[in-house]
Amino acid sequence: MAIISEMQEEKRPSVPFEASLDPSNPLGFLEKAFDFIGKESDLLLKDSAEKDIATAVTAANKRLSEAEKKKAEKETVKPIEKKSTKESLPPMEPMEVEKPKKESLKPTEPMEVDKQEEEKSGPIVPNKGNGLDFEKYSWTQNLQEVTVTIPVPCGTKSRSVTCEIKKNRLKVGLKGQEPIVDGEFFNAVKPDDCFWNIEDQKVVSVLLTKQDQMQWWKCCVKGEPEIDTQKVEPESSKLSDLDPETRSSVEKMMFDQRQKQMGLPTSDEIEKQDMMKKFMSQHPEMNFSNAKFN
């Protein structure tokens, strides 16, 4: 009975492995494969696990080299000799080419591009306050807050202003008139931490506290033109006001944005590359000459 139970344990049903390979992140696929092997077998618990894996990589490398050699041999084809056709074809008479008229040689006039269409084609560069300026109002932002500035007639008092600040909506204007700003926020705010006031009786200033203080807004009110958040320039001096964990996340996000703009690897990708370099240095017996890394 003991022998039969051991045979039953050895013949465990195979478990399918589901994972897709991203060519730009082969190490992520390897991590999933090793996690799966660790859960479904005891290979990684053996003392010879590292040696067995290195042997498997070397064998795969060898098979890849042999496959490439066979492919190169198949693609080598002898050039076909072309028979001369000079004797079979009669000589061609030269064709007369009509010279272009002087009028046709004039340079083409440059096409004018509609600036409005150009602006609609993509995000807009933000203003100095990382927002946008409109005819009737403007808005600026940092990671924690959004400030909406609305010019009003000189001498306007607070009792003449209507301002409704909700979690997902803002409505500001003068009593008896159409609202100047009326729409849904790009993201939610904290209504209890928002307020408005009149500056010098000519400007209504609305301070909005973001609910998610780790994201730049592309617009203040949905439906208006969006800014390019990759061109936002936060004030570095205000990073010191954040707690260490939030500050670290903000600095990492800013670094990754700059790296992407320059076509360079992000912090996570750099960490994975360093891990791979460390693995290669620890296994000099392995041949990585034909390996391709992104």
Image: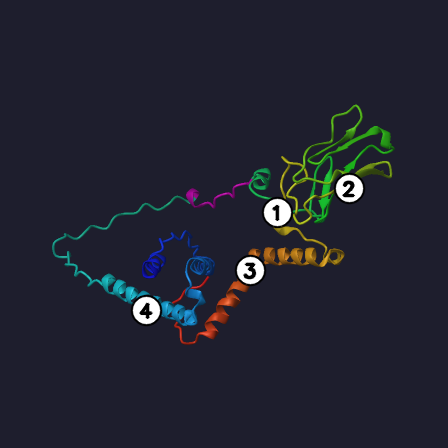
Q: In the image, which residues are magenta?
A: 103-113
| Of callouts 4 and 2, the N-terminal one | 4
Q: In which quarter of the image is residue 33?
A: bottom left
Please tell me how crowded label 3 is: few (under 14), some (14-19), or many (20+) other residues with Cα within 10 Å: few
Residue sitting nearer the eye, 33 or 39: 39
Where residue 186 appears, as percent x and y from the top left, is 65, 39
Q: Name the residue under label 4.
A: 62
Which of disc 4 and disc 3 is earlier in sequence? 4
Q: Distance between the residues labelled 1 and 2?
A: 27 Å
Q: Is mark 1 on a helix, strand or loop?
A: loop
| Mark 1 crowd level (few <14, some 14–19, many ≥20, 10 Å Cα) | some
**Residue at the bottom extreme, as displayed:** 285
Q: Which residue lies furthest to the front in this view?
A: 1
Residue 267 visible in the shown view: yes
Sequence-first disc among 1 and 3: 1
Which of the pair 160/2 is nearer the observer? Answer: 2
Three-letter amino acid code of the residue under disc 1: Asp
Q: Mark 1 points at which residue?
A: 228
Mark 3 to mark 2: distance in Å? 35 Å
